[in-house]
Image: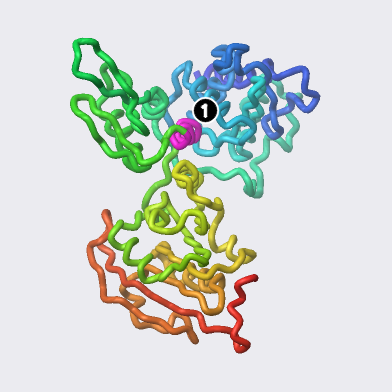
Amino acid sequence: MLAMRQQFFAERIDGIFRTLSHEHVTNVPEGFNKRMILAYVVSEWGSPDSSRCGYINDLRAVIAKFMGRDEPKWNATSSVIAACRRRSGEWMTVDGGALRIRVYKKGTAHLEVHPDMAYRLNQILAHLHPFAIPAEFRTKPKQKAREFKMMNRPLPFAVVSLLASMRVARERVGSDYIERYAEIRNARCFEYGDRDKAVTREAERVLEAIGGVRAGKGWGYFQFDYDPDQVIDEIVSSGCVPHIQSHQFYPTPARLAAIAVELAGIGDADTVLEPEAGQGGLAEFLPKGRTTCVEISPLHCAVLAARGFRHVEADFLQWAETAPKFSRVVMNPPFSQDRAALHLAAAAELVQPGGRLVAILPASMRGKDVLPGWETQWSSVYAGEFAGTSAAVVFLTADRPLEPNGKTDAGY
């Protein structure tokens, strides 16, 4: 039975090599360690070709077994290819980073497999072609690929499929006897029909995590304050939503955001930095045209982009090493493992002389000399402000002194 199982897996993943484009000389069927190019994954009518997508789907099904995940349905990859084509020419993360795919408008797809998955697939492929797969391709890689990150365990395919099938919500308009409906701006709803309650609830939690608010009567819909299509495409492709606790993502409550911005005293000429921007809860109160948001999560960056915020997708601590300076920094850093102090120190280096930094920090830091030489003020303690955590916080307002020559370093 085990031998038959290996044979079955091998035949499924061998199919993708048989469908590689012969027009591209870079295609070498010697294993999954190289980029593969498939032609005609999108038909001449602009829709995903189900048969071509089926080969990628077989590959995803085998990888799902490796990840301890449920198996995708036969047509699950069509929605991923459609999402990738809407972001033509961009790499899209698939299945939690196990794959990444780039689709062009003409219908060609570039496919790469994460090294940690590639060597396992090559071991199975060698079952069919023992002399065709080089030994080095069947060895576990010693180093992680820098630009190819594995994420948290992906969502169940049933949840991803439900999200992929969402449509624009409509409402009845007019008072006559003729049924007329108009689209509700930035609102999405599930397709009609029976749905598994557990799957539906999980999909609803995903929508809530990206800022959706339940509205309407009956079946209802989810209302967003931005166009959610790009973000939903990201989730359908990657199968992931960043885990709130693992990313220390606790959205800044509107009340605290308003206080922080007021303390910052932002003038018409100030440039503003917001590290760890999340989905823009704090940035919403900052001047859009003069604010730079830094955020590590690709999904949160997609939300920021959809909401019109200027952003940089990066680890803030690394980005800060070569970043320009700003006259105002307003921040709500992660708290765990002393990260608040690390992020505060990095942000302080980016404040121009004469500039100001306002930070929401753990109450335990209140009164400490966290920025020697700066003029600092601490607020009273605010408790129970963040949903999902009992953390008490304080506001730090810190003014960086001018240089001895009186310059603000504004042109730095």
Q: Position of residue 101 (x, y in %)?
A: 60, 31
Q: On the image, numbered disc 1 is attached to which residue?
A: 83
Indicate the amino acid at tag 1: Ala
In the foreground, 55 or 351: 351
In the foreground, 177 or 49: 177
Magenta span: chief secondary structure: helix
Position of 103 compared to 28: left or right? Answer: left
Relative vertical location of residue 30 with respect to residue 376 in this rendering, above or below: above
Q: Residue at x 60, y 13 (%)?
A: 43
Relative vertical location of residue 233 with respect to residue 306 in this rendering, above or below: above
Q: Residue at x 72, y 18 (%)?
A: 21
Quick check: is 175 in the magenta stretch? no
Q: Position of residue 334 (x, y in %)?
A: 41, 62
Residues in magenta?
Answer: 230-239
Residue that sits furthest to the right in the current view: 25
Q: Quadrant of residue 119?
A: top right
Quick check: is 235 in the magenta stretch? yes
